[in-house]
Image: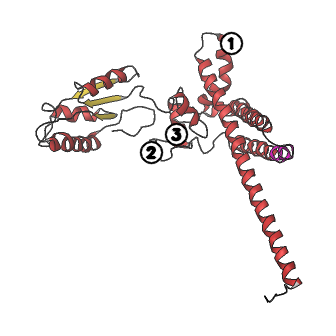
Amino acid sequence: MQESFPVSGVHTQELSRNVDRWIREGQAAVLCSLAVAYFIFYYFSGTLFFDIIHFLLHKCARSRIRLLRQISKVHSVHHWYFDRHLHYNEKYRILNALTNLPLELSCQLVGSWLSERALSWILQRDQREFATTILHLTLIIEVIRVVVVIYLGGRDTNHISFHSVPKDRDWILVGPEYHSLHHMYPDQFMSSLFRLFDWTLGTSSTLKNKRITMTGVNGAFGAALKKELKSDGVESIKALRYGVDFFDDDSVSAECIKTLRDTDILILAHGLRYGDVMKANYETSRRLVELFAQHRKPLESRRPQELPEV
């Protein structure tokens, strides 16, 4: 006959309390996770809505319709305040605080509210109240952020007066390095927080006014690439020829050094399929990159310097 072991009432109550505590902690963790997810969704939606309006205002600035050009000045004032040279013009500080910053806040508030309205269609009734509470918190944070920026004179973390724009080590978030390029090239780099908008519209880079030097321009790849570059508004495209300007013994011509000195982007498109391909392809490319880094001279201008590219 199997012997039974009675369970103590004290142990049963303790186990019940532990289970209740674990359930409450689990529910709290789920609510915290949902709150963070809702906040990110609302905040991202607000910045995305601003990016859309931002893009349209820049398009209006070039419109033939005078009314649209006048409307675009609501944002243009921001570029007058922090100009293409990444300098602040105190003459427009108050005007920026009265026009552009309220515009940015309004777009963020509307975008966040619209995203909550869309989300409410798929949520249960008891979930909507919680989602609405997080929306209110998001709106308060957005208001506080803009009020602080106004107090600081419009000088937030994305607007830094660089003498030379440093390397942008981020890939998805917008920082001062990325946003400074928007002020230098107002029709590009439109995103304000996440780069999704620029990825979608193809406005995350520009070759305008770049001095380009290429190797292999007579090859199939180089010739096609040169044709595309000409259509992108580059300032100039110069060619370096294998056996004329650079050689497989690491020597280069004086004209090659002069060309590399006046280059912003070096494109290596040459390649041989016969002979000593290691020297003709890899060693010459390595040598040209070294000479480019050693001799390249930035274009003298009031605008901030940009890093050279290979």
Q: Amino acid at mark 1?
A: Leu
Pinpoint residue 189: horizontal percent, then vertical percent: 53, 32
**Dot 2 surroundings within 10 Å: few (below 14), some, or many (20 or more)?**
few
Q: Quadrant of the C terminus?
A: top left
Q: Quadrant of residue 288?
A: top left
Q: Residue 67 got which mark?
A: 1
Q: Amino acid at mark 2?
A: Lys
Query: In terms of secondary structure, where does tag 1 sit?
Result: helix
Vertical placement of residue 239 versus 154, above or below: above
Q: Which residue is mark 3?
A: 178
Horizontal arrangement in the rendering, residue 107 relative to residue 187 (left or right): right
Q: Quadrant of the N terminus?
A: bottom right
Q: Marks 3/2: CA distance?
A: 9 Å
Horizontal arrangement in the rendering, residue 243 relative to residue 67 (left or right): left
Q: Residue furthest right?
A: 9
Q: Is residue 153 visible?
A: no
Query: In terms of secondary structure, where does tag 2 sit?
Result: loop
If you read the primary sequence from the N terminus, does the residue marked by circle 2 or circle 1 appear first? 1
The reply to whether the C-beta atoms of the residues labelled 2 and 1 are less than 8 Å apart is no
Magenta stretch? 125-133
Residue 184 lies within the magenta run: no
Q: Quadrant of residue 116?
A: top right
Q: Which residue is mark 2?
A: 167
Q: Residue 173 got which mark?
A: none
